Image (cartoon, helix red, strand yellow):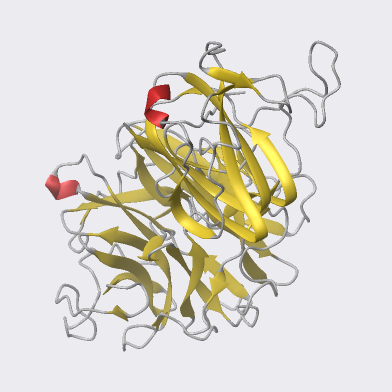
Amino acid sequence: MQNYAMGEGKWVFIDWRSIWPGYGTDQGGRSLPHGFLMPYGIEFRAHKPRVEEAPVLVADQPWEFQIAGGTLLADQGRFRWWYHAVLNPNDVALAYAESQDGVRWTKPALGLKAHAGSTVTNLVALDSWGGREQGHEVFIDPGAPPAERYKMVSSNEHVDPFALFGAVSPDGLTWTQFPKDQPIIKNRCDTVNVGSYDQDQGKYVLYTRQRDNQLGRRGINRSESEDFRHFPPSEPVFESSPLDPPDWDFYTSGYMRWPGAVNAHLMRYSVYQRTLDIVNIHLAVSRDGKTWHRPMAREPWIGGGTSNSASYKCHYACTGILPTAPGEWSSYFSAYAEGHNHHGKRTPGKLLRAVSREDGFMSLSAKDRGEFFTLDFKLEADSIRLNARTGYSGHVRCAILAADGGTPDSTVMTPDHPVPVYRGFTLEDCAAVRGDHIDVPLAWKGDLRRLRGRQVQLHFELFNADLYAVKFSPA
């Protein structure tokens, strides 16, 4: 198992990877109150968003038979949305909207693509090959030449249902499609497929929607490449488990890196339940983008009677999360009152906003008193900050342990466990964090800068608290 230790950037709590498992007793045979460095009284919690009833985008233009999904990005001081405009039951175009706050969206007249003889539309300049082009998903390639800064992946079931196609753009509005006989990947990709550039790996990554050739059930595959124009065949990374109902399909992935976090990936994937003909959005998380788990098991994150979006039968997540206010993240999804198989018979559909706390998808939480110890890491930060919320009489405190042993004049032994703790950095030396904070520094009697370069462990004590993230500010 790979060691994912915190210590750099922002660490979010999606699994136990950074937490020391401890021992039931001290290795010397002594019986200790809660075991030796063992986590106690804590659990992971997944948090559902607040779904707003008022739609943020509706089909209100003459060319919009229906609207759906798409990609949202914070770019150049504004929010940008590339969404799908269904022109008629057999033709899909890419449309564009923008916003300053993520709530009020405008559809600018781009003058790029005509409808019914007029170019006063918000349709982007994307050449059509005919047939039903679907699932246009956009991402920014930060290291690309200016002419290819924006990239797109899409599918066209009439040209080739076993291929995925690419396009590039200097501005996200005028696009150059790759030749249709040169797909970027040969796979049964269906819709919707997500592309991205992973700066940690220096590679392009695709998450494609697949269909199992034997069972006919859909799942999510992954492929990576250093060349956006050529990808190897994708491999399954997220499929129904043997315990999932047999009529479940995993549809659109809604994949993205967890914003600003180290070693954290997120999916808001859609589950199609064939028998009920409904689609709900579920949550999945990963450290490496390859091995995924579902913190809510089979419970929907959005839909399924779990929110005020329950009046809709189908929910499909859009790609992207926007920072719409201090401490607030917004994600978006398509909602339809009709079932999945009512193609051509649906009402135009609505695009809704789901509001979460910043980093608020999951937390490490204690209802009463809890504690845990991290894996050891080299401390390179001048400040350690928390995203945390405490309830009545709750608090969060942190001690810094000398994983390298320290020295007798720099460490003390605490009565609770025989582990050296740096002087000035015991639990009692830490000012308790209370209340609701997105970004609050931990403060000790000691000066954190004198521990820079030392191998340390953190000992967290929680009481009636949710801990969402730990942030390490560089020296």
Task: Give the percent coordinates (x, y) of residue 327.
Answer: 43, 62
**At 53% from the left edge and 28% from the top edge, which residue is drawn?**
5
Examine the rendered structure and indicate whether residue 220 appears above or below residue 371: below
The quarter of the displayed image where residue 105 is located: bottom left
Residues 40 and 15: in front is 40
Q: Quadrant of residue 372?
A: top right
From what the image shows, is residue 411 above or below residue 283?
above
134 left or right of 246?
left
x, y percentage for residue 11? 49, 40
Residue 191 seen: no
* Nearest to the observer: residue 147 or residue 1: 1
Q: Is residue 420 above or below residue 199?
A: above
Residue visible at 54% across and 40% down in the picture = 430
Closer to the camera in the image, 327 or 347: 327
Where's the N terminus, which quadrant?
top right
Determine the residue positioned at 55% across, 74% down. Answer: 51
